[in-house]
Image (cartoon, coloured by chain):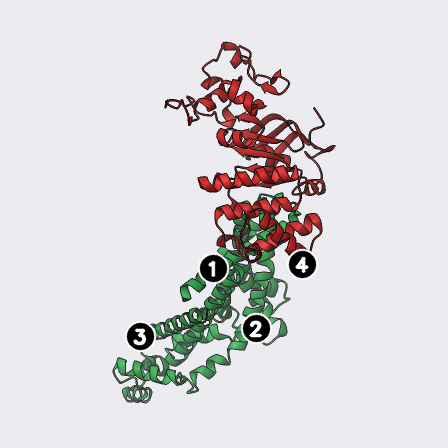
Chain colours: A green, B red
Amino acid sequence: MLRYLAARLLRALLTIFLVVTFAFFVLHLSGDPAMMILSADAPPESIAAFRAAWGLDRPLWVQYLNYIAHALTGDLGNSMRDGRPALDLVLERVPATLSITLPAFALKLGIGIPAGIYAALHRNSTADRLTMLLSVAGFTVPSFVLALVLVLVFSVQLGWLPSAGSDQATSVILPIVTLGVAGAAILARFTRSAMLEVLGQPYIRAASAKGLSWRRVVVEHALPNAAIPTTTIVGFMVGTLIAGAVVVESVFAWPGIGRLLVSAVSNRDLAVVQAILMLVAATMVTSNILVDVIYGWIDPRLRSKGVVDAS
Amino acid sequence: MAEPLVALRGLTVDFDTGKRVIRALHGIDLDVAKGEAVGLVGESGCGKSVTWLAALGLLGKQAHVGGEVRIEGDNLVGAPVATLERVRGRRIAMIFQDPSSSLNPVHRIGRQLGEALTLHRGLTGASAAAEAQRLLDRVGIADAARRLGDYPHELSGGMNQRVMIAIALSGQPDLLVADEPTTALDATIQAQILELLGEIRRETGMALVLISHDLGVVAENTDRVCVMYAGRIVEDAPIATIFGGASHPYTRGLLAALPELEGPRRRLVPIAGVVPEPWNLPSGCSFAPRCERVIADCERAPPASEFLTPDHRVACIRAGA
């Protein structure tokens, strides 16, 4: 088990390294930070001085090795815009992002999973059809459209909630709802089909034939099995807690990681973009490992395979 | 004849597919006496399994069940769920074709066995564990104590069927319905499992309904055979009568298709034609299109079941001829 985890960890680090490398070259080859930050009509001397100051005049591979060497010591470079360490800039945005993504995550689980279970248990009923109709609507409407509709209704028409910003306590509500709706819709659909799959299995009929009440059959026999595929999608949602709100943050002018990323990319503020991508890759990879561990915990078949892998 | 343990009367099942309603059972009459072993034989889709799933109310909402299933005065058809739950596992237990997928993959054997013991006998904790171990021992699982902690995927198909039998026994049922219990197992294991069922039956006096497509298996393990065809029982007689003087042409066809161990080698004779689809049954006898002895009257109406002798009934208008 320990060897298995160590192997997973090594693979995780490799993934993060590849993300960083790929991002480094794409960013450096796709635009000149000096032009972006100083503007194109700055005097050539200033541009040359800016480049020399940030090491942009050196060969790309030298810049790359330099970056990696520093990154390994925990130094992810400074923002070209305000000179502060990129990591600080990114980390101070994390609470703002989590303050909308975490409640949205709870909303997804709290609505999506019960709705999916209910729909599966009442297959082909009106409630099932209605749930699935709402679910399709929920995940096909793009989040920026939903965001605008919500603003139109609750801010412009009703005047109940602020349309953007983060200055009021109620400002979080619309971003949370916007993020939560699509996730809940996906999860409801996924949970429903996982439940239907499990309910069709012979062991469900066998459990009923034993004399267990339907309630116990569902709770003790169906749900633990349906949890296995559902974990995959929930794990993916955990992975998007940091970077899953780019669009929503932009629409609602929410001062989180997503907005920082958008402005950093358009300014070619390389160190900041890299720091964000590293953080995103790290959360994704962590949630993947977490999902694997949970799989082993709920599915004994995978547990013994894991042991075989490790030996 | 004494009061039967279970009596099916005019049991019908209609499956509502949304587009049309398909009748899978056309009025099954069947008595199972206390301690008796009855075989239920027929081709896939003839309604052998559906009969007992319907009796226990295990078919789900798309199935409409009619007729009566009497067990000690209770009619299970249309009975409240609580009544059905008191019968399932305790009066009538059932084991299934594919033992490995009939056990829940995420729970240990001990838990799945203990669940039934708690439910039917009120055993918990150490007394449930001790009884679970005794039952696993009884069904011939070596090292029972350790096996209680195993998951179904860690056991072979034959072992899992033994576990299923142990679970069925935990409710001390009056009747065990074994739905093709050995179809998914290889031949040597099949014999062992059938032997085990016989032993248990002799010990406990439990009745057995053995559902199989294999007339040979049924002949060796039961006292009486019901032959089913297209949702009806076409012949019902003691084993000796079936092998000595089967009356229904379908039963005779099944016998002719069985290989013999003794005597000269002969070609097996298949029954010509195929089973009609349930939604496209002929208006008369369902077997008429495949029958060698068909006459014009056969196509008029489905033949009623007639007793040739008190323990031999046949649904064929030419049975006497």
Is disc 1 in the same subunit as disc 2? yes
- C-alpha span from label 3 to label 4: 65 Å
- Identified by mark 4, the residue type is Ala
Q: Earlier in the sequence, mark 1 or mark 2?
A: 2
Q: Nearer the viewer, mark 3 or mark 4?
A: 4
Is disc 4 in the same subunit as disc 1? no
- Identified by mark 2, the residue type is Ser
Identify the residue under disc 3.
A25
Residue B63 appears anywhere in the view: no
Identify the residue under disc 2.
A99
How packed is label 4: few (under 14 Cα within 10 Å), some, or many (20 or more)?
A: few
How packed is label 1: few (under 14 Cα within 10 Å), some, or many (20 or more)?
A: some
Identify the residue under disc 4.
B126
In the image, is residue B24 above or below residue B241?
Answer: below
Residue nearer the viewer, B39 or A23: B39
In the image, is residue B75 above or below residue B312?
Answer: below
At mark 2, the secondary structure is helix
Instruction: Point out residue A136 in the picture as x, y percentages from the top left corner.
Output: 52, 52
Is disc 3 in the same subunit as disc 4? no
At mark 3, the secondary structure is helix
Is disc 1 in the same subunit as disc 3? yes
Identify the residue under disc 1.
A302
Q: Earlier in the sequence, mark 1 or mark 3?
A: 3
Q: Earlier in the sequence, mark 3 or mark 2?
A: 3
Instruction: Point out residue A194 in the picture as x, y percentages from the top left corner.
Output: 52, 52
- C-alpha span from label 1 to label 2: 35 Å
Q: Nearer the viewer, mark 2 or mark 4?
A: 4
